Amino acid sequence: SALIGACIAFAGVAIMFAGDLSGEGLVGNLLAFGGAIAAGIYIVGGRSRRKLLNTGAYCLIVYGFATLFLLPLAFAESGLVPASSDDWLILVAMALVAGVLGHTMYNYALGRVSAFVVSTSLLGEPILSSIMAWVILSEVPSDWTFAGAPLVFVGIILASGIRLPRRKPTGGNGSTAA
């Protein structure tokens, strides 16, 4: 069932976070948890708005307001201004790939599947982030991430209702049974 899948996925995320419950890791995990709650609220709220607007119009409004209000706050709060053209390239790539492409896919999905399935699929983001950090930054994920990730993926598959193809039984002579 979908609820069992969501619980399995959530357990996988909990295992991934359990490996880093001290110091800065705890603060980061608590911030990630808060972000997950905000994402869930966004998904549920977005579902009702998506019924009224097509994906493009919805994204234009949401991304426009986010850029208008959050970008100046981010730079003012952190004092962070990319120093080099490479830093700007990375910042723009993150904004376009993760922000625009990733969130547009979620917003598109909101018009096609339940908010429950979309929000459960968000639990895959820490895994994809870990893989990207491994490939791009050579930051090897923790053993806890390797332990929890399969549960997250299995849970997402169960929650989404995807039916995996079953192999047809074969007879002893290698022919397919009728």
Image (tube, grey):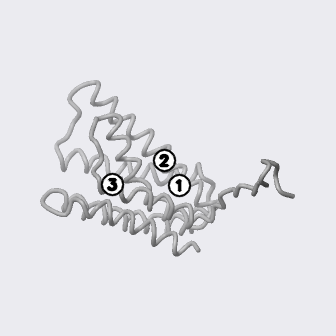
Q: Which of the marked residues, 3 or 2, is nearer the chain's N terminus?
A: 2
The residue lying toward the viewer, choosing from 64 and 143, is: 143
Badge 2 crowding class, 10 Å Cα cut-off, few under 14, some 14 to 19, many 20 or more, is some
Taking 19 as reference, is 69 left or right?
Answer: right
> Helix or strand or loop: what does disc 1 sit on?
helix
Nearer the observer, disc 3 or disc 2?
3
Mark 3–mark 2 distance (CA, rounded to whole Å):
22 Å
Badge 2 amino acid: Gly
- Give the total number of marks visible in the rendering: 3
Mark 2–mark 1 distance (CA, rounded to whole Å):
7 Å
Q: Position of residue 132 (x, y in %)?
A: 37, 40
The residue lying toward the viewer, choosing from 129 and 176, is: 176
Q: Which mark is residue 145?
A: 3
Badge 1 amino acid: Tyr
> Helix or strand or loop: what does disc 3 sit on?
helix
Residue under the image location 40 percent in, 56 percent down: 149
Q: Position of residue 17 (x, y in %)?
A: 28, 61
Badge 3 amino acid: Thr
Residue under the image location 33 percent in, 66 percent down: 14
Q: Position of residue 49 (x, y in %)?
A: 56, 65
| Cβ–Cβ under 8 Å for marks 2 and 1 | yes
Taking 12 as reference, is 77 left or right?
Answer: left
The N terminus lies in quadrant: bottom right
Question: Which residue matches tag 2?
Answer: 102
Q: Which mark is residue 106?
A: 1
